[in-house]
Image (cartoon, rainbow, N blue to C red):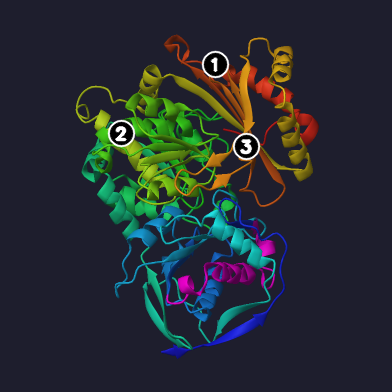
Amino acid sequence: MANFKVSRVETTPFEGQKPGTSGLRKKVKVFIQPHYLQNFVQATFNALGADRVEGATLVVSGDGRYYSKDAIQIITKMAAANGVRRVWIGQNGLLSTPAVSAVVRERVGADGSKATGAFILTASHNPGGPHEDFGIKYNMENGGPAPEGITNKIYENTTIIKEYLIAEGLPDVIISTTGVSSFEGPKGKFDVDVFDSTSDYLKLLKSIFDFPAIQKLLSSPKFSFCYDALHGVAGVHAKRIFVEELGANETSLVNCVPKEDFGGGHPDPNLTYAKELVARMGLSKTHSEPNPPEFGAAADGDGDRNMVLGKRFFVTPSDSVAIIAANAVQAIPYFSGGLKGVARSMPTSAALDIVAKHLNLKFFEVPTGWKFFGNLMDAGMCSICGEESFGTGSDHIREKDGIWAVLAWLSILAYKNKDNLGEGNLVSVEDIVRQHWATYGRHYYTRYDYENVNADGAKDLMAHLVKLQSSIDEVNKLIKGIRSDVSNVVHADEFEYKDPVDGSVSKHQGIRYLFEDGSRLVFRLSGTGSEGATIRLYIEQYEKDSSKIGRDSQEALAPLVEVALKLSKMQEYTGRSAPTVIT
């Protein structure tokens, strides 16, 4: 058994180590500076306090992006020096963000140990590689992201840090092979357990869904399926779950080999970046696929986001969570006893609100950030939740879960088609969505992203929008001057949320303009980029008239889009004549 000693390394603070909604994200060149990662990790240990660190069992893994393997070695040695008892690492350092949450909540070590927290190495849907992004975030003992009270303490500690602790004489851990390595330090034994990345996550998913029913659907010659992991970590889980467990053909999997640079692509599951899947599903503007699969889905880099597609048909994330909630009790065994409640992030369309009202469910509108859902779930108030940024999940873990969302859709398809896999036409993804619209109405919805804009210009635009809100009459005069066919604004504010569980208040969560006919404009600065500012503009129009629910979304929203761009003076403040991404 190798022995190690603890070294105290002098350091000085770095500016800007404030964790956002999903941890600290910066360019790799920032993270590889001497002491940079070490400062943040030590600041996290200091924020948690000795009672949460000494003797703890921590998970350390991520999406496999560039610099992850180095970071795992650094964090492991720092954990040992700070008195952590065990570090658990997914084989090859790979665990999707939902799998990490599942491991923290469900896994029991050979010695009976349970994880008390996790360092997740990911920048989610951001590109990877030597010149791209890296990220790190800390999750708590419930498997969910650290609350603001902890992230604020981490940031405070980064501004005053003078030294960090690291184990000297502890060899690099071989993460390619499963097994336990034991070491001895000043505070006693320290173990590193490298374990199978999918087993615990798969076990949890099998307790939620009817795998035989999904297997029957996937084995039908009438049904075809395609899953694109965009060279992210979800590819590790996909082969095991979809091919080995559910019997899908291996040719159903696309880009399912994880790569440090995501194959040079942008691992964000949307119509802009998931080009290969979009083409295969018959939705490419330049490539016409003669016979697309019945169902397609994509994941982001760390596997917590999802995109769902039918044959030549896109399902918006806002509709997706509403449809899952509307069908969950019948189609998914885990929810057979009923839903405790549902929740969505504020910018997400109100499609879920209508389902909640129809089904008499508790409903919550929360700020962007999964920790707000986690609080509701821990209190037993929420079963299913989602956000428009391609994140959907349930109370089985405390993160959004891309593969869970795909299995939820496959469950709904299996349920709707249980009697016609032999004869008759399949009920398609498009059929399910259009039936939902006919029942609940349609929320036409789009999001415009303006990425890496000048931060000062972005702040000025937001300040301009807040100032406009002081006079609704003036806003309506401006709108009528732009488009006379747009409804009047009846309420405008900066969204503020009081958590019903812990009473905490989150302010400045986005600027809202709410219209008389149920339409909405929302403007928000995103915290997930690594440089510059990202302005997100959300445009939504509710249509109850069943004769008007089949229009093209961009055509239906064109009047509101024009109002939003002119009211905000988007081009004037950002210099951009068009968004970077439209979803």
Residue type at mark 1: give it: Asp
Q: Is residue 227 magenta?
A: no
Q: Quadrant of residue 491?
A: top right
Tell me where the magenta segment starts and ends, as one range.
26-55
In the image, residue 171 sits, relative to residue 323, either above or below, namely: below
Q: 409 or 103, which is in the foreground?
A: 103
- Tell me, for residue 510, which label it has, or none: 3
Task: Describe residue 497's horizontal placement relative to residue 18 as left or right.
Answer: left
Q: Is residue 38 magenta?
A: yes
- Image coordinates for residue 527, horizontal then vertical, percent: 63, 47
In the image, residue 63 sits, relative to residue 512, either above or below, namely: below
Ranked by sequence position, the earlier of labels 3 and 2 is 2
Extreme front residue here? Answer: 503
- Image coordinates for residue 502, horizontal then vertical, percent: 47, 49
- Image coordinates for residue 247, horizontal then vertical, percent: 27, 46
Crowdedness of circle 2 by 10 Å Cα count: few (<14), some, many (20+)?
many
Residue type at mark 2: give it: Ile
Name the residue tied to disc 1. 517
